[in-house]
Every structure is written in C-alpha cells, then in structure tokens.
Image: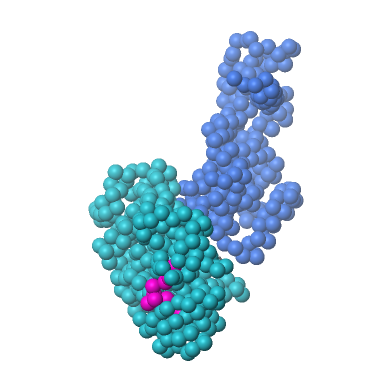
Chain colours: A cyan, B blue
Amino acid sequence: MASVTISDMRKSFGKHEVIHGVDIKIADGSFVALVGPSGCGKSTLLRMIAGLEEISAGELRIGERVVNELPSKDRDIAMVFQSYALYPHLTVAENMGFSLSLKKASKAETEERVGYAARTLGLEALLDRKPKQLSGGQRQRVAMGRAIVRDPQVFLFDEPLSNLDAKLRVQMRGEIKALHRRLATTTIYVTHDQVEAMTMADEIVVLRDGRVEQAGQPMDLYDAPANIFVAGFIGSPAMNFFAATIESVDTLRLEDGTAIPFSGGEGLAKDQRVSVGIRPEHLMLAPGGAPSKITLVEPTGPETLLTLEVGHAAVTMVSRERRRFTEGEIITIAPEPDRLHLFDPETGMRLPQRQ
Amino acid sequence: MLRPKRLGIALFKTVMVAIIAIWSLLPIAMIFISSFKFDREIFAVPFRLGFTPTFSNYVALWEQWGGFFSGLVNSLIITVFATVLAVLASAIAGYAYSRNRHPVLSSSAFFLIFIRLIPPIVITLPLFPVVNQLRLNDTHLVLIILYAAFFVSLGTLVMRTFIDQIPIEIDEAAHIDGASRLQVLRRLILPLSGQGMVAVAVFVIVFSWNEYLFALIFTTANARTAPIVISEMIGAIEGVQWGVLFAATSIQLLPVLLFVILAQKQLVAGLTAGSTKG
Ligand SMILES: Nc1ncnc2c1ncn2[C@@H]1O[C@H](COP(=O)(O)OP(=O)(O)OP(=O)(O)O)[C@@H](O)[C@H]1O
Ligand SMILES: [Mg+2]
C-alpha cells in the first residue's frame, strides 16, 4: 500500500488544457472519491495516475516514488474500467490470472491467488465461464477480481457501477466498501454520482473544469461547502439558493421581502448582499413562515419530495412529516436557522459563519 | 405463413442464387468430371454425365508428369510461407494503424490504397535484375516475399478494421496488468482478430496457389509452381492430353476449394468487419 501525492498536475490535449494544476494528497489506505460533472476531467486524472495518459506538467508520486515517466505496468496499480474491459476470449479464471501468467507465476501461486479473489467475490462457480456468459454484476466482480489478484499499491476505479441497475449498484457499493475495509488498499474512485461518493469515500475531491473545488471528508463537504458549486453538487436533492441582504446579526431579508432568522452571522456587515443556500431537508413546515404553493408532490416512502413556488422562485423541500400533501395547497415554511449557508454572490465563496 | 409478396421475393432470391452457383460451379464441375473420362469422351457432344469413370488420367499424370507433383510441393511451400508472412505483417501493421493516431499514419493509409491501383507487373519487372543480383532467382523465397508483399497493403487495411473493433480498454487493462505491446498483440489482439486473419489468409492463399505470371518470370526449375507445370502441359509438343490436363487441374483446384469452404464463416465475418456494430 502507498499514499498518492499529486502536485500541480496538468494535462493538455494538443493546445487544449483540460487539467489546470491539481493538488491532491491521498493518505495510505484511504478511499478517495473524485466527483464532478461530466467532462470535468475525472477520467483524465485517473488515467494519468494509471499511466494511460501522459502527464503534461506537475508531479505524481505513488509512495515515495515519482512515477511521472513510469509505464503503467511498473506503477503497481490496478484499474477497474467502466466497461470492465475483460478479455473476451479468456475464462474468468484466466482473466483474473492474466497478470500472473505474464509474470510466469507458478501454477500453485496462480491457483491460490485466483482462488482467493474468487472466494472473496463469490465467483468460485463461474471460473470456467467466458465473460459473454456472465451478467453485468458478475462481469463487474471479475473486473474487481482481476484487480485484487494483482495485490497492487493502489486501486483505481472509473465509474465501475454505472452500467448496473439501481439495486445492484447499491449492493456493489456495499461490497466495494467492505472489500476496501478488508484489504485496506489505497483506493481512488471516480464517479459522477455524489451519493456514491458520500456513502463510500473517506474523502471526496470535487472537480470542476479541471480544477479542485474542494477536498475533504464527506460530512465536511455537506456541512460546510467551500463555494456555491460544491454546495449545489453535494447533497441530493440539490440545495436551494436565494439572493438576500443581511438585515441584522440574526436576520436576512430575501429579495421578495421575506425575513429569515438565522444564527452565526456575527462577522457579516449590515446590508451586505449574500447568496443564501438552504438544503431541501432543512426546510420545515412553520406557522408564520413563508407562504408557498405546492406544485409537485413526490412521495418516496420515508419522506416526501415537494416542489414549491415561493414568490416566483421554485424551491425543493424534503419533508419527513407523515401528512398528506396535495398539489396546489398553500403551506408555510421556514429554514432551520442554524443550517443556512451564506456565499459571496460575486465570488461564489463561502462567507465566514460561526457554526 | 409467408405472404405472397414475401414468398415471391424468397423465390426470386433462391433462383438467382441457383443461377449464380451454377454459373460459377459448372466449369469446375466439368473439369472435375472430365478428369475421369477418356480423352475421346471429353469433347463428345452432347456432354454426357453417364459414363464409366476411369483413373487412367491420374495414373498417366503420375507417370508422365512427375514435375507436376514437385510443382505442387513448391506451390504448397510458397503458399504457406507467403500466407504466414502476409498475415503476420498485416496483423502487426493493422495493430499499429488501429492503435496510433499520427498524420504520417493517416497519409500512409492512403498510400496503402493507392499502391493497390498500380499494376503489380509495373513494379515487379524492374525487380528482375535485383533478384538476379541477389541470386534469388528460382528460389522459393523470391515468390514468398513477392506474394506476401502484394497482400500486405490490403491485409493491413482489413486487419486494421478488425482490430478497431476491439475496445482499446482491453489493451489498456493488459498494459496495467503488466503486458508489453508485443504481449498485447500476441495474447489478445491476434486471438481476438482471428476472423480477420482468416480473411487475409484466404486472399493470399488463393492468389499464391494460382499465380502464374510472376512464377513464370522468377522460376525456372527448382521453384517451379504447379500452374507453371500445367501451362507446360498445354504447350507440350506431342499434342495436349486433355484428360491428364484436367486431372492435374482438378488436383490443383481441390485444396483451395476445400479451404475456402472451411473458412467460409470466418471469411464472411472478416470481409464485413466494420460494416456493423458488435
Ligand atoms: N483523448 C482526448 N483528446 C482530447 N480531449 C480529450 C481527450 N480525452 C478527454 N478529453 C477532454 O478532456 C475533458 C475531460 O474529459 P474526461 O473524460 O476526463 O471527463 P470526465 O470527468 O471523466 O467525464 P465523464 O463523467 O463524462 O466521464 C473533456 O473536455 C474531454 O473532451
Ligand atoms: Mg469519465
């Protein structure tokens, strides 16, 4: 196992720079998720770590070694591809043992290591099948088995679950997590699904347009997003944003005149313009709150997702109340006063708030 | 139940296929049948299917034209090696074309097509003095290299199309697994592009086995191929023995025919590579 240190790493395709100086420190044995919208450079970054894409500038260390110039095979990493990339003409056992056969490992060693991976992943019964004869979830497991057999310093995953159906995705999520707990191999996991990132990772790195927007533990990103982008990206359904001005230390006024009580605004100037972020799950039914018209009701069972019209703005709210909501109904709502997020409307950066 | 219109189309297709099959197979069948007839029966009009077959032509071929059988051996050696050479070179070049993007490669791909348009003889005749100088005249090697060379351009394009269908992630996964480029080629690309290789092989085999002109130019005795011997039979001084000639032709025809039939499935897949997904 090893740590991974990325320093001011850049990537250009021709004249077009797509990774603009990224710094990430990944501790030995940790599970890090790279998230971000499509095209932000997640795969490119991962492929640079894997040695599949040249590093245009900057430095990449695995452990103490600088590996910029090292070919993939000497970096001691294993990668699971979105398409799984299994060798179609080889059996499951041969797929998993391919790296060993290249090394001319003994038959006994190969059997032992492939057997171990197969037991870990529940693939014993499928060892003689070809990839064509497997279901999507089974292929996914074989791809992971191939990585496990290598016993690498670092696991790299590029959206490994995106080809699976929702239920299997949740199951595999748990399995990958359990596997990581067991093997404790440093893992870098690319996904565009922030729920996956939140549930699996020790640390999340949010990327946008080839830059790191924020890196930190999942709950830190949720509780204190560094800017409007991260605030909107982490959390589902996404955060609501309003333009507002600071009226006093404990009151905000929205543009439509609604006054909102809040706490922790000691450092802010009166009349300062801010962007307020309110998570849907931090809105409550409150007598005397802002009157809102329900335009859409989506019950999921434990909670109900509401789309509301407040003034002219569309607002989403998640309610856990056991109550019937009907479309067209007017309800009054207010946010939890200590759960507001304030951002500078110009820079998009989080404003200092006492928690 | 087929609707009448679909039935009509099906019928039309069957008839067309039958006509084409008869059209192309009839001469072969006639040669084959005639090789079991006595000379006087061969050109009897009308052509008769009912006759007592005789092996006398084959016996005469064996006794009088031993050169034909050593010609067959030469043909076999040349065909096998030319095919192996052309298929391997095409596969390696096709792999390079498929996996690399470079302006030089794209323009040379055009060159590969262009070069097919030049009549081979234009390039080959100037080679004659060179071959002489190298003392390669009348060796298997010169024909092996020539025949292989003729098909490397087409073969490369076929193989490239084929290898393009193998997802690049498979190469990448193998590189991460520790494979060198050569290992990727040998362990993954070649086994996965077998159909393409069969298609290329068919071209080379059919051509090398039947080729006449270059064999005539570059061989005299030792490396004489079967088609050359057959042509000598036609030009024999004491008059043509048609039965023996047809016997030789039948023997000459048989291996290629068998091979093409066996390789049919792969061949079709190879020739249509790239035209459909998956
Ligand atoms: N080989 C390439 N040549 C040129 N541009 C490329 C190449 N590969 C990626 N890019 C560009 O780099 C940027 C980042 O692509 P990348 O595939 O890393 O995004 P991603 O974050 O993985 O997106 P997704 O979630 O859709 O997979 C994109 O703008 C893409 O167009
Ligand atoms: Mg990607």
Q: Quadrant of the N terminus of chain B?
A: top right
Measuring from the top left, give residue B221's x and y in whole percent: 62, 40
Does residue B146 appear left or right of residue B263 in this picture? Answer: right
Measuring from the top left, give residue A35's x and y in whole percent: 44, 68
Measuring from the top left, give residue A147's x and y in whole percent: 35, 59
Does residue A48 appear left or right of residue B54 in this picture? Answer: left
Camera-side residue of A179 and A277: A277
Can you tell which quarter of the image residue B93 is in? bottom right
Residue B106 visible in this rendered orientation of the protein: yes
Image position of A164 with respect to B238: above or below:
below
Image position of A355 with respect to B25: above or below:
below
> How many tags in the picture?
0
Measuring from the top left, give residue B199's x and y in whole percent: 58, 42
- The boundaries of the magenta stretch are A333-342
Image position of A141 with respect to A234: above or below:
above
Q: Which residue is drawn at the image coordinates 57% and 56% (left, top)?
A: B98
Q: Quadrant of the C terminus of chain B?
A: top right
Camera-side residue of A81 and B132: A81
Q: Which residue is drawn at the image coordinates 26% and 51% (left, top)?
A: A119
Does residue A146 appear left or right of residue A59 in this picture? Answer: left
Residue A350 visible in this rendered orientation of the protein: no
Does residue A27 appear left or right of residue B174 in this picture? Answer: left
Question: Does the magenta run of residues contain B8?
Answer: no
Q: Which residue is drawn at the image coordinates 54% and 50% (left, top)?
A: B165
Image position of A156 with respect to A246: above or below:
above
Camera-side residue of B103 and A287: A287
Camera-side residue of A174 and B167: A174
Q: Which residue is drawn at the image coordinates 45% and 66% (left, top)?
A: A332
